[in-house]
Amino acid sequence: MRAKEVRIVVPSRDLLRDRWSMARPSSERAPSASQQLEALLGKPWPFPGRPPKHDLSTWRVTDDWPDPVPVTLAEVEVFERWFGDLFDELFSSPL
């Protein structure tokens, strides 16, 4: 049985350089996300200055839930499935 002849070709540096230069994308880069937002909004992005602080004194908390809160059997089963081990540990009597 005769061995198959294998020919190895090593490209020259000039050939590799030419191929690399042809594969390069254009030197113009796509705009960044901030530049795209600025073009869409017409304002610089991110907005200059600090963000406004939340004034908690103007917040109002209301509780308009009924007493007792109605709970369905399906909701109870979900909590028992996910937190059953924790509930057993919390509410079991110590030995």
Image (cartoon, rainbow, N blue to C red):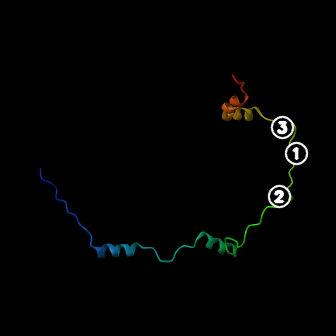
Residue under numbered circle 1: 64
User: Is mark 1 in CB contact (under 8 Å) with mark 3?
Assistant: no
Residue under numbered circle 3: 69
Measured as percent of width and height from the top left, residue 63 is found at: 87, 46
The residue shown at (87%, 54%) is 60
Q: Secondary structure at mark 3?
A: loop
Tell me which amino acid carries mark 3.
Val
Comparing 92 with 59, the one in front is: 92
Would you call the spot at circle 2 few (<14 residues within 10 Å), some (14-19), or many (20 or more)? Answer: few
Furthest residue to the front? 95
Tell me which amino acid carries mark 1.
Asp
Q: Secondary structure at mark 2?
A: helix
The residue shown at (14%, 54%) is 3
Comparing 91 with 29, the one in front is: 91
Tell which circle, 1 or 3, labels the residue nearer the N-terminal end: 1
Measured as percent of width and height from the top left, residue 27 is found at: 48, 77
The residue shown at (77%, 64%) is 53
Which quadrant of the figure has residue 85? Answer: top right
Tell which circle, 2 or 1, labels the residue nearer the N-terminal end: 2
**Disc 3 or disc 2, which is closer to the eye?**
2
Measured as percent of width and height from the top left, residue 12 is found at: 27, 73
**Disc 2 or disc 1, which is closer to the eye?**
2
Whole-angstrom CA distance, mark 3 to mark 2, is 28 Å
The residue shown at (74%, 35%) is 75
The quarter in which the C terminus is drawn is top right
Tell me which amino acid carries mark 2.
Leu
Would you call the spot at circle 1 few (<14 residues within 10 Å), some (14-19), or many (20 or more)? Answer: few
Q: Tell me, for residue 56, which label it has, or none.
A: 2
Whole-angstrom CA distance, mark 2 to mark 1, is 20 Å
Comparing 7 with 83, the one in front is: 83
